[in-house]
Amino acid sequence: MNYVARIALIVAYAVLALAALGRSSYQISTKLAEAPVPYLVSGVSAALYLVIAIALWKRWAGVALVGTAIELAGVLVVGTLGYVEPTWWADETVWTGYGSAYGWVPLVLPIVALVMLVRERRAVLSSSEPAPSSGDAR
Protein backbone atom coordinates (compact mmCIF):
# COMPACT_ATOMS: atom_id res chain seq x y z
CA MET A 1 0.00 0.00 0.00
CA ASN A 2 1.47 3.33 -0.92
CA TYR A 3 2.22 5.97 1.67
CA VAL A 4 -0.56 8.39 0.70
CA ALA A 5 -3.22 5.66 0.73
CA ARG A 6 -2.05 4.44 4.15
CA ILE A 7 -2.14 7.97 5.59
CA ALA A 8 -5.60 8.59 4.08
CA LEU A 9 -6.91 5.41 5.73
CA ILE A 10 -5.31 6.32 9.05
CA VAL A 11 -6.85 9.80 8.97
CA ALA A 12 -10.26 8.45 7.96
CA TYR A 13 -10.25 5.90 10.79
CA ALA A 14 -8.99 8.46 13.32
CA VAL A 15 -11.75 10.91 12.35
CA LEU A 16 -14.39 8.17 12.58
CA ALA A 17 -12.98 7.12 15.95
CA LEU A 18 -13.32 10.69 17.25
CA ALA A 19 -16.83 11.08 15.82
CA ALA A 20 -18.03 7.77 17.21
CA LEU A 21 -16.32 8.41 20.55
CA GLY A 22 -18.00 11.80 20.86
CA ARG A 23 -21.39 10.41 19.95
CA SER A 24 -21.18 7.34 22.17
CA SER A 25 -19.64 9.18 25.13
CA TYR A 26 -22.51 11.64 25.18
CA GLN A 27 -25.14 8.94 24.69
CA ILE A 28 -23.68 6.55 27.25
CA SER A 29 -23.11 9.24 29.88
CA THR A 30 -26.49 10.95 29.54
CA LYS A 31 -29.08 8.42 28.37
CA LEU A 32 -27.73 4.87 28.45
CA ALA A 33 -30.94 3.51 29.99
CA GLU A 34 -32.97 4.71 26.98
CA ALA A 35 -31.15 2.58 24.40
CA PRO A 36 -28.20 0.64 25.82
CA VAL A 37 -27.54 -1.62 22.83
CA PRO A 38 -27.25 1.10 20.17
CA TYR A 39 -25.16 3.34 22.41
CA LEU A 40 -22.82 0.52 23.37
CA VAL A 41 -22.52 -0.51 19.70
CA SER A 42 -21.41 3.06 18.93
CA GLY A 43 -18.87 2.83 21.75
CA VAL A 44 -17.54 -0.47 20.43
CA SER A 45 -17.30 0.98 16.92
CA ALA A 46 -15.28 3.93 18.28
CA ALA A 47 -12.84 1.56 19.97
CA LEU A 48 -12.59 -0.57 16.84
CA TYR A 49 -11.91 2.47 14.64
CA LEU A 50 -9.13 3.51 17.01
CA VAL A 51 -7.57 0.02 16.99
CA ILE A 52 -7.65 -0.04 13.18
CA ALA A 53 -6.08 3.43 12.93
CA ILE A 54 -3.28 2.42 15.29
CA ALA A 55 -2.78 -0.90 13.49
CA LEU A 56 -2.46 0.88 10.15
CA TRP A 57 -0.04 3.41 11.67
CA LYS A 58 2.12 0.71 13.28
CA ARG A 59 1.86 -1.49 10.15
CA TRP A 60 0.21 -4.34 12.06
CA ALA A 61 -1.36 -5.71 8.91
CA GLY A 62 -2.96 -8.73 10.60
CA VAL A 63 -4.65 -6.61 13.27
CA ALA A 64 -5.83 -4.09 10.65
CA LEU A 65 -7.17 -6.89 8.44
CA VAL A 66 -9.09 -8.58 11.27
CA GLY A 67 -10.34 -5.22 12.58
CA THR A 68 -11.68 -4.11 9.22
CA ALA A 69 -13.32 -7.50 8.66
CA ILE A 70 -15.05 -7.19 12.05
CA GLU A 71 -16.04 -3.63 11.21
CA LEU A 72 -17.57 -4.62 7.87
CA ALA A 73 -19.44 -7.50 9.50
CA GLY A 74 -20.75 -5.14 12.19
CA VAL A 75 -21.89 -2.54 9.67
CA LEU A 76 -23.67 -5.21 7.61
CA VAL A 77 -25.31 -6.89 10.61
CA VAL A 78 -26.39 -3.69 12.38
CA GLY A 79 -27.46 -2.07 9.10
CA THR A 80 -29.51 -5.08 8.08
CA LEU A 81 -31.09 -5.59 11.51
CA GLY A 82 -32.03 -1.92 11.56
CA TYR A 83 -34.14 -2.45 8.44
CA VAL A 84 -35.42 -5.95 9.25
CA GLU A 85 -36.40 -5.25 12.86
CA PRO A 86 -36.27 -1.50 13.59
CA THR A 87 -37.93 -1.96 16.98
CA TRP A 88 -34.70 -3.54 18.26
CA TRP A 89 -32.92 -0.21 17.82
CA ALA A 90 -34.38 2.48 20.06
CA ASP A 91 -31.88 4.97 18.63
CA GLU A 92 -29.24 5.15 15.93
CA THR A 93 -25.70 3.82 16.09
CA VAL A 94 -22.72 4.71 13.96
CA TRP A 95 -23.55 1.64 11.84
CA THR A 96 -27.35 2.12 11.61
CA GLY A 97 -28.54 2.36 8.02
CA TYR A 98 -25.13 1.04 6.96
CA GLY A 99 -23.59 4.26 8.27
CA SER A 100 -25.96 6.57 6.40
CA ALA A 101 -25.71 9.26 9.11
CA TYR A 102 -21.97 9.36 8.37
CA GLY A 103 -22.34 9.48 4.59
CA TRP A 104 -22.00 5.70 4.29
CA VAL A 105 -18.32 6.03 5.15
CA PRO A 106 -18.66 3.22 7.74
CA LEU A 107 -19.78 0.91 4.91
CA VAL A 108 -17.34 2.00 2.20
CA LEU A 109 -14.22 2.46 4.34
CA PRO A 110 -13.78 -1.15 5.48
CA ILE A 111 -14.29 -2.39 1.92
CA VAL A 112 -11.60 -0.04 0.63
CA ALA A 113 -9.31 -0.92 3.53
CA LEU A 114 -9.81 -4.66 3.07
CA VAL A 115 -9.07 -4.45 -0.66
CA MET A 116 -5.88 -2.48 0.01
CA LEU A 117 -4.75 -4.73 2.86
CA VAL A 118 -5.40 -7.93 0.92
CA ARG A 119 -3.54 -6.57 -2.12
CA GLU A 120 -0.63 -5.59 0.11
CA ARG A 121 -0.59 -9.02 1.74
CA ARG A 122 -0.65 -10.77 -1.65
CA ALA A 123 2.21 -8.58 -2.90
CA VAL A 124 4.30 -9.40 0.17
CA LEU A 125 3.56 -13.11 -0.11
CA SER A 126 4.30 -13.25 -3.84
CA SER A 127 7.59 -11.39 -3.41
CA SER A 128 8.72 -13.79 -0.68
CA GLU A 129 7.95 -16.95 -2.65
CA PRO A 130 10.90 -18.64 -4.33
CA ALA A 131 10.97 -18.30 -8.09
CA PRO A 132 9.93 -21.45 -9.95
CA SER A 133 12.81 -23.33 -11.50
CA SER A 134 12.99 -23.38 -15.24
CA GLY A 135 14.44 -26.82 -15.59
CA ASP A 136 14.00 -30.30 -14.24
CA ALA A 137 16.43 -31.00 -11.38
CA ARG A 138 17.09 -34.69 -12.02
Image: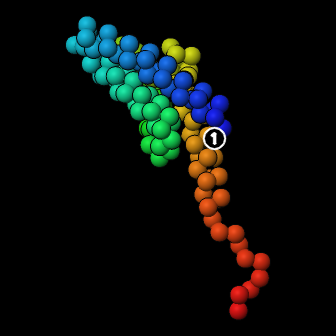
The front one of 106 and 118 is 118
Residue wearing tag 1: 1
Where in the figure is residue 39, as x and y percent of width and height? 32, 18
Q: Secondary structure at mark 1?
A: loop
| 135 relative position to 35: left or right | right
Which residue does the image show at 52% across and 16% down from the upper left? 102
Q: Of 21 and 99, which appears nearest the observer?
A: 21
Check the image and report above or below for 121 versus 72: below
Q: Amino acid at mark 1?
A: Met
Which residue is located at x 77 percent, y 77 percent? 134
Outermost residue on the bottom side: it is 138
Q: Look at the image and tell me whether residue 102 can be seen.
A: yes
Q: Quadrant of the C terminus?
A: bottom right
Residue at point 37%, 21% (across, down): 42
At 25% from the left and 11% from the top, the residue drawn is 29
Q: Is residue 71 visible?
A: no
The 10 Å Cα crowd at callout 1, few under 14, some 14 to 19, many 20 or more, is some
**Quarter of the rendering containing residue 127:** bottom right
From the top left corner, tell me how far across and down residue 131 is, in percent: 70, 69
Q: Quadrant of residue 54?
A: top left
Q: Name, please, the residue furthest toward the top.
A: 30
Report how many numbered discs are placed on residues in the image: 1
Q: State the image coordinates of residue 31 (x, y, percent, origin top left).
A: 26, 9
Q: How is the image coloured?
A: rainbow
Residue 52 percent coordinates (x, y): 46, 33
**Residue reaching furthest left?**
33
Q: Quadrant of the N terminus?
A: top right
